[in-house]
Image (tube, rainbow, N blue to C red):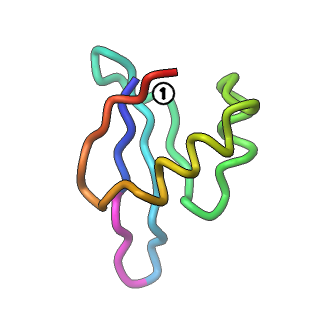
Amino acid sequence: MYIIKVKGVAKIPDYVQLRDEEFTLLAYFRVDRPDKTLTKIGLGDRIDDIMNLINELPFGKIMKLEL
């Protein structure tokens, strides 16, 4: 799984994309509201770990997420 943090502009907020190995979009969510989306895709128990990675990840970079 890959994680990408995208910088918003003007009224569009920052958001995160989660993609699988073939780069198919699994989920996208606002950086400040991850709970519902991560729970929906089965990662609700890893919210704290994922949010720590997101906070450290620079905008526009792709990171392989090992769960």
In the image, residue 40 lies in the stretch drawn in magenta: no
Instruction: In the rendered view, tell whether residue 51 sits above or below residue 55.
Output: above
> In the visual, does 10 lie left or right of 53?
left
Q: Residue at x 73, y 47 (%)?
A: 35
Q: Residue at x 30, y 38 (%)?
A: 63
Residue at the spot 45% in from the left edge and 66% down from the top edge: 14
Of 65 and 40, nearer the camera is 65
Residue at x 40%, y 23% (from the top left corner): 1
The image quadrant that residue 56 belongs to is bottom left
Residue at the extreme top: 22
Q: Label 1: how many residues lie within 10 Å, few (<14), some (14-19) or many (20+)?
A: few
Quarter of the figure with residue 8 = bottom left
The residue type indicated by label 1 comes to Leu
Residue 64 image point, x, y percent: 33, 29
| Residue 25 image offset from top left, x and y in percent | 40, 29
Query: Does the magenta segment cover residue 9?
Result: yes
Q: Which residue is mark 1?
A: 26
Report the magenta residues as a range: 6-10
